[in-house]
Amino acid sequence: MSTGKRRIFTREFKLAAIERVLAGEVAKAVSQDLRISAGNLSEWCAEYRRHGPLGLRRAGGQLKALGPSLGLDVAKAEYFADTQRQIAGLQRKVGQQQVELDFFRQALRRVEEARQRNDAAGVKASMRRSEQ
C-alpha cells in the first residue's frame, strides 16, 4: 500500500501537533486528524519533553547542528529541558506521596473501625496484655 516515500514534517508542524496534545486533546485523535502515526507523535512528544523545541529535528538531522543554524538559544533550550526534568521528578514525588497518603488513610480507617467495635457496651476499652 505504501508508495515508499517518506513524509518529512517541519518543526512547526510537529510543534502544532505537540501543542494540541499538551492542550489536552487525545493523542490518538490528533494523530488520526493529522494523518500521522501515533508512534511518531509519541516520539515527538518525548523528544520535546527531553530537549524542548530543539529536540524536534528533521529526519536524519543532527541535534547540535540545528541550534545555531536556526538561531535557537541553546541555553534556553537546556534550561527548558532541565525544568521539564525537575517537573517530572516532582510529579513522581507527588505520586509517591499520594500512595503513602492512601495507605495511611486506609490504616486510620481500620484503627477507627477497631475502636468502634471496642466501644460497644460490655467490652473492655483497653487491650489485652501481651504475654512476656
Image (cartoon, rainbow, N blue to C red):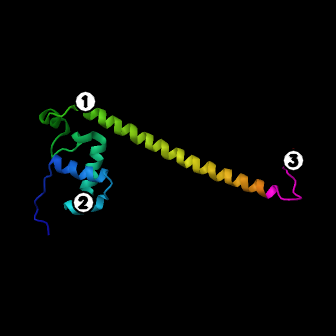
Name the amino acid, label 3.
Arg
- Residue drawn 31% across the image and 44% down it: 49
Q: Is residue 43 magenta?
A: no
Name the amino acid, label 1.
Ala
Q: Which mark is residue 129?
A: 3
Q: CA distance from mark 2 to mark 3?
A: 66 Å
Residue that label 2 marks: 31
Q: Is 10 placed left or right of 94 in the picture? A: left
Q: Which residues are magenta?
A: 117-130
Place of residue 129 in the rendered image (x, y in percent of width and height, measured from the top left): 87, 47
Quadrant (top left, top right, bottom left, bottom right) of the C terminus? top right
Element at label 3: loop
- Residue drawn 27% across the image and 53% down it: 20
Q: CA distance from mark 1 to mark 2?
A: 31 Å
C-beta proximity under 8 Å, tags 3 and 1: no
Q: Which mark is residue 75?
A: 1
Pointer 1 local density, CA inside 10 Å: few below 14, some 14–19, many at least 20: few
Q: Is residue 124 magenta?
A: yes
Place of residue 22 in the rendered image (x, y in percent of width and height, measured from the top left): 31, 50
